[in-house]
């Protein structure tokens, strides 16, 4: 079975969904008495990881991968890491929801490795 470029891009884009689901779960379990900005801030980590994954797919598939993009991409990978730490610190809902961070950390590691290769064009 062979995949077209479009099918492959759709497949890799669909793989960016689990961190979004984790963010939605955080937002929904965050107490509604919290300010909206706070609820959004403690649930932004998965969205940030998905944006990294999708940007790497778009740059690797449709853009112009260059080694110079690697340092910038790696620096952007720190944003979801800080957002994850922030959610541990400020989330006021049930603490069991933090188990979803395992998914986010796995996806963040994949984004760093695979996304870094996609934006630089250097595949191992």
Image (cartoon, grey):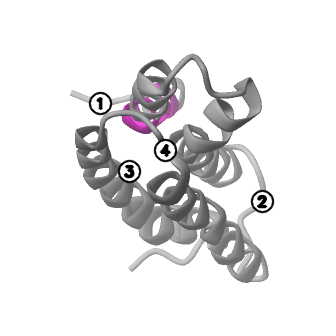
Q: In the rendered view, would you say 66 is above or below 107?
A: below
Q: How crowded is mark 2: few (under 14 residues within 10 Å), some or many (20 or more)?
A: some
The disc, 2 or 4, on the residue closer to the chain's N-terminal end is 2
Pair 2/4: label in front: 4
- Of residue 89 and residue 124, the one placed in the foreground of this image is 89
Magenta residues span 9-19
Percent across and percent down for residue 110 are 38, 61
Pair 4/1: label in front: 4
Q: How crowded is mark 3: few (under 14 residues within 10 Å), some or many (20 or more)?
A: many
Mark identifier at residue 2? 1
- Residue annotated with mark 3: 104
* Quadrant in which the C terminus appears: bottom left
The disc, 3 or 1, on the residue closer to the chain's N-terminal end is 1
- Residue annotated with mark 4: 91
- Of residue 103 and residue 67, the one placed in the foreground of this image is 103
* Quadrant in which the N terminus appears: top left
Q: How far apart are marks 2 and 4 (CA)?
A: 39 Å
Q: How crowded is mark 4: few (under 14 residues within 10 Å), some or many (20 or more)?
A: many
Q: In the rendered view, would you say 67 is above or below 120?
A: below
Residue drawn at 70 percent across, 76 percent down: 75
User: Which residue is the extreme one toward the front?
Assistant: 33
Pair 3/4: label in front: 4
The disc, 2 or 3, on the residue closer to the chain's N-terminal end is 2
Pair 3/1: label in front: 3
Percent across and percent down for residue 89 are 50, 59
- Residue annotated with mark 2: 64
Residue drawn at 38 percent across, 51 percent down: 104
Q: Main secondary structure of the magenta part?
A: helix
Percent across and percent down for residue 51 are 64, 43
Q: How far apart are marks 4 and 1 (CA)?
A: 44 Å
Q: Distance between the residues labelled 3 and 4?
A: 16 Å
Q: Distance between the residues labelled 1 and 2?
A: 24 Å
């Amino acid at each position: 079975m062979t995949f077209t470029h479009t099918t492959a891009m759709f497949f890799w884009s669909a793989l960016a969904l689990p961190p979004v689901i984790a963010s939605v779960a955080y937002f929904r379990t965050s107490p509604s008495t919290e300010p909206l900005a706070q609820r959004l801030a403690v649930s932004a980590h998965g969205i940030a990881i998905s944006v990294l994954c999708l940007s790497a797919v778009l740059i690797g598939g449709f853009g112009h991968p260059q080694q110079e993009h690697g340092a910038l991409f790696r620096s952007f990978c720190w944003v979801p890491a800080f957002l994850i730490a922030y959610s541990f610190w400020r989330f006021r809902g049930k603490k069991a929801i933090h188990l979803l961070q395992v998914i986010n950390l796995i996806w963040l590691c994949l984004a760093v490795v695979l996304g870094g290769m996609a934006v630089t064009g250097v595949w191992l």
